[in-house]
Amino acid sequence: MDIYNQLSGAYGHALGVEIIFAATAGWGLETDAKRHEKLAQAMTGYVSEHPVFYTIKLLSGLGPRSA
């Protein structure tokens, strides 16, 4: 609730909830991409084909990382 309260205070209820949903989806993608090579490849391909969308800022930070 603390995070929601901070986000809704700064951005309003609707955008605060949207940010939380986007972050949750991003976390899920990152976790799954670590386990599934095809998803990691799909994310990498999407990022390279759509470099200007805001979604890419999220996905590019979530892609496979070198150890």
Image (cartoon, rainbow, N blue to C red):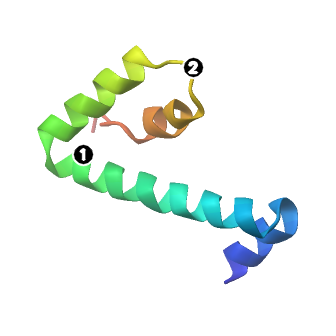
Corner quadrant of residue 2: bottom right
Quarter of the image with the N terminus is bottom right
Residue at horizontal 52%, vertical 36%?
55
Give the CA separation, mark 2 to mark 1: 22 Å
Drawn side of residue 8 relative to residue 48, left or right? right
Q: Is residue 1 above or below residue 40?
A: below
Front residue of this view, candidates 56 and 35: 56
Q: Residue furthest front?
A: 14
What residue is at 50 percent from the left and 18 percent from the top? 51
Q: Amino acid at mark 2?
A: Val
Residue 32 locus on image (x, y percent): 24, 53
Q: Quadrant of the C terminus?
A: top left
Q: Which residue is mark 2?
A: 52
Instruction: Rate crowding at label 1 as few (under 14), some (14 to 19) or many (20 or more) other CA atoms within 10 Å.
Output: some
Figure check: 22 above or below 47: below
Q: Secondary structure at mark 2?
A: loop
- Residue 33 badge: 1
Considering the numbered disc 1 on the image, is that residue within a helix, a strand or a loop?
A: helix
Q: Residue at x 59, y 64 (%)?
A: 20
Q: Is residue 61 left or right of residue 20?
A: left
Residue mark closest to the camera, 2 vs 1 = 2
Residue found at x 68% / y 73%:
3
Residue 35: image x %, image y %? Answer: 16, 51
Please tell me how crowded label 2 is: few (under 14), some (14-19), or many (20+) other residues with Cα within 10 Å. few
**Hey, which residue is sitting farthest right in the picture?**
9
Query: Counting residues from the N terminus, which is met first, the one under dot 2 or under dot 1?
Result: 1
Residue 45's disc number = none
Q: Position of residue 6 (x, y in %)?
A: 79, 71
What's the amino acid at mark 1? Ala
Q: Is residue 39 left or right of residue 7?
A: left
Q: How far across and down, in percent of the image, does residue 59 sit?
A: 44, 37
